[in-house]
Image (cartoon, coloured by chain):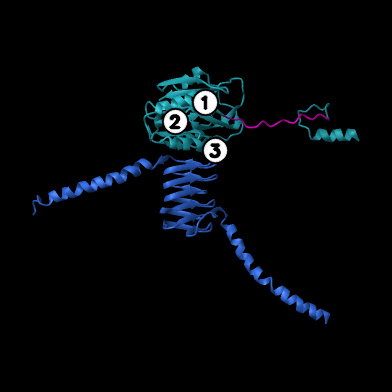
Chain colours: A blue, B cyan
Amino acid sequence: MWKRRDREEEQPARSTPEPAKENTPLSNTPAVRSFESDAPRGVATIGKAVYIKGQIIAREDLVVDGSVDGTIEAQEHRVTIGPNGKVAATIKARHIIIQGQITGNVEGAEKVEIRNGAKLLGDVRTVKFVCEEEGTINGSVSSLRPESKSAPAAEPKAASATPPAQQTLTPNDPKK
Amino acid sequence: MSAVLDKLRNLFQPDDHPPYLPSYRPPPVQPTAPKQLTRPSNSLEQFFLALDGQDRLKILDLCGSPATTEFLFQQDHIPRPDPFYRALELAFGNGAGYLDRQLEPDRVDIFVAHTLDHKEGEFDAVLLWDSLQYLRPELLEPVLEQIFSITRPGAPLLAVFHADERIEEVPVFSFQVQGRNSLFLAEKDRRRPAQHFNNRMIEKIFKNFASTKFFLARDHLREVLIRR
């Protein structure tokens, strides 16, 4: 009898911690994303076991921790090359953070950061450039500022100059 | 028992250790901390004065330190860090035999073909730092020819040579530009220089260049501003 009661008492006691066990695997998932802990929602991630060949156009922030061979464009967003990332591509983005290896030119409309352990073989064009002590670059680093300022200024002038030219041309067109 | 212990101790002594001093232990060598210092540099100031009034100049930096790259970028220039020191290590090693390996013509040819491989007259200024003092004459000559060809006429070049001729190994520094006349030096290693450069020898190796100007700096360093 005593044994039966003991078993009956133990059973409900065992049943309570079971839901807690179900939660344990979920709690392990953030550890995988340790280096991107500050990344907000809406971040696309290319994992370290993924290889992509071709053109990537991102309309959200992108983390590349795998291999990419081609081009990466995220004009309005941030591209992070993770510590395992091996990229042979031209990258154009608003903000580029490099922790892995890149072979190719990099253009950051706002900022390019080269973190410790990163290796970049290619040219950088950006407005703000930061390189940590153990980051390696083999390429030139030039400012995007003067060209980005002059380019929009030149376009309206050209646009305003062309319509009158077209207008004057049409009446004098010998075919008409 | 003590005699046996002494014999055992002798087993672990180096071969050249005197056998009549079995219990002798040399005093432990205190590892000296790598030297790090920030100091003003007149040659660096002159280098930047030569660049004044011009922006977006392409500047080759053979030390390739991130701090220098950031500084030159902030000055509105186009820094080009070059892994020259790393290439030197890869081609000739960094051990005691690195100078002997510079005598091998095939190695020299491969190094020259793959290093400083830039367009003719591409750079408006060059930061050579102390790179040249680790090159034997057999390697120094083609490297200087290459540097001459990739810089535009009138371009300033800044080089540093260790001035103490008695010293066998000179400190290998990482040179970081912190301001227009402020230089941070961090000792990375010590290495035997290929040759000691006095003023006459420096003038001789830069004989194809327009001018050389010497600056006596601290820490047994001789800084030289060269005009292409």
Residue at point 44% right, 46% down?
A111
Assess disc 2: are there few (<14), some (14-19) or many (≥20) residues with their C-alpha within 10 Å of its C-alpha: many
In the image, residue B70 sits, relative to residue B20, either above or below, namely below
Assess disc 1: are there few (<14), some (14-19) or many (≥20) residues with their C-alpha within 10 Å of its C-alpha: some
Q: Disc 2 sits on a residue from what chain?
A: B
**Residue A18, x across and y down, in percent:** 67, 71
Which residues fall within the magenta stretch? B23-37
Amino acid type at circle 2 is Val
Structural distance between the alpha carbons of marks 3 and 2: 22 Å
Please tell me whether mark 3 sits on a helix, a strand or a loop.
helix
Amino acid type at circle 3 is Leu
Which mark sits nearer the N-terminus, 1 or 2? 1
Instruction: State whether the magenta stretch is mostly helix, strand or loop.
Output: loop
Residue at point 49% right, 59% down?
A41
Image quadrant of residue B144? top left
In which quadrant is the N terminus of chain B drawn?
A: top right
In which quadrant is the C terminus of chain B drawn?
A: top left
Q: Which residue is mark 3?
A: B90
Q: Which residue is mark 1?
A: B40
**Residue B138, x across and y down, in percent:** 50, 27
Amino acid type at circle 1 is Pro
